Amino acid sequence: MAADRTILESFPASDPRGSWPAEEFAAEQRRNGVPAEVVMDQPNDRFLVIVRNTQMAVAS
């Protein structure tokens, strides 16, 4: 699964604001034309901001 995505940033799920820091970062990336999305990495208890590599190929 990791091969089909690029991780742009990682945020702890224990943050008092929950997923908001990750969502805000992803929104900024989208404003800059990067098709970022937030996913939960449950085994590591983190929110990841990712770009699916198939989307990067289309966006390029």
Image (spheres, rainbow, N blue to C red):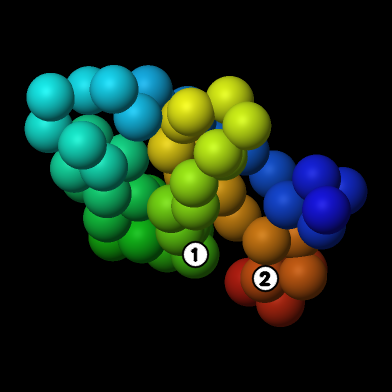
Q: Which of the two discs, 2 and 1, labels the residue nearer the N terminus?
A: 1
Question: Which label was assigned to residue 35?
Answer: 1
Compared across the picture, whether 55 is left or right of 14 comes to right
Q: Residue furthest front?
A: 43
User: Taking 15 as reference, is 1 above or below it?
Assistant: below
- For marks 2 and 1, give the CA distance: 7 Å
Residue 37: percent from left, percent from top: 45, 59
How many marks can you see?
Answer: 2
Q: Which residue is more in the foreground, 24 or 30?
A: 24
Which residue bears the numbered disc 2? 55
Q: Amino acid type of disc 2? A: Gln
Q: Amino acid type of disc 1? A: Pro
The quadrant of the image that shows the C terminus is: bottom right
Q: Which residue is more in the foreground, 51 or 12?
A: 12
Residue 29: percent from left, percent from top: 37, 50
User: Who's the residue at 36% across and 60% down the image?
Assistant: 30
Residue 32: percent from left, percent from top: 35, 55
User: Taking 52 as reference, is 7 above or below it?
Assistant: above
Question: What is the secondary structure assignment of the residue under circle 2?
Answer: helix
Asked whether disc 2 touches disc 1, contact meaning CB atoms under 8 Å apart, the reply is yes
Q: Is residue 12 visible?
A: yes
User: Who's the residue at 80% across and 45% down the image?
Assistant: 2
Please tell me how crowded label 2 is: few (under 14), some (14-19), or many (20+) other residues with Cα within 10 Å.
Answer: some
Question: What is the secondary structure assignment of the residue under circle 1?
Answer: loop
Question: Which label was assigned to residue 58?
Answer: none
